[in-house]
Image (tube, grey):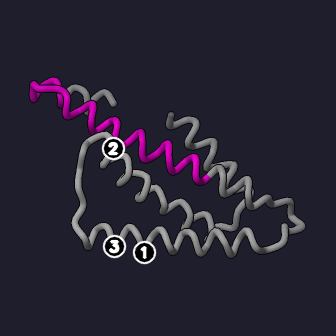
Amino acid sequence: LYTVQKNLLYVALTNLDACVYQVTYSAKLITTAVFSCLILGRTFSFSQQTGLGLLMVGVALVQVSQVGEMRKPTGEHPLVGLAAVGTACVTSGFASVYFEFWLKKAQDFWVKQGQVFFF
């Protein structure tokens, strides 16, 4: 899963400006929060939900401004880059939450330490 994520990030970097890539990739916090709710059953406070909402609005504004621009003559394709970053955000969020879920399933302390050591 991490190999796919790194390849998607490479595709995104070749098709987006660096600042748009950075702001858009910060959406992995949102996907991680969603997967935390779905897989781990976590709940978030009002201030945490507000912060995630503001982050979502900021990422959406950057994406709309990037898609609205014409394609640059250097061969950049903004829609391909945004799709790659979005998929990388989803894989990153899922991988991190699933790893945490897997570690919390183990009951023995030494089993947990071994899992963290090997992964």
Q: Tell me which corner region of the image, top left, top right, bottom left or bottom right, holds residue 111.
A: top left
Marks 2 and 1 sit apart, C-alpha to C-alpha, by: 21 Å
Left or right, 13 with reference to 61:
right
Amino acid found under the numbered disc labelled 2: Leu
Q: Secondary structure at mark 2?
A: helix
Q: Tell me which corner region of the image, top left, top right, bottom left or bottom right, holds residue 118.
A: top left
Q: Position of residue 51 (x, y in %)?
A: 35, 72
Q: Would you name the residue on which mark 3 appears? A: 50
**Within the magenta stretch, is there residue 99?**
yes
Marks 1 and 3 sit apart, C-alpha to C-alpha, by: 6 Å
Q: Are marks 2 and 1 in contact (CB under 8 Å)?
A: no
On screen, 104 above or below 87?
Answer: above
Left or right, 53 with reference to 5:
left
Mark 2 or 1, nearer chain start: 2
Q: Secondary structure at mark 1?
A: helix
Marks 3 and 2 sit apart, C-alpha to C-alpha, by: 19 Å
Q: Would you name the residue on which mark 2 appears? A: 38
Q: Which mark is residue 54?
A: 1
Q: Secondary structure at mark 3?
A: helix
Quarter of the picture holding the C terminus: top left
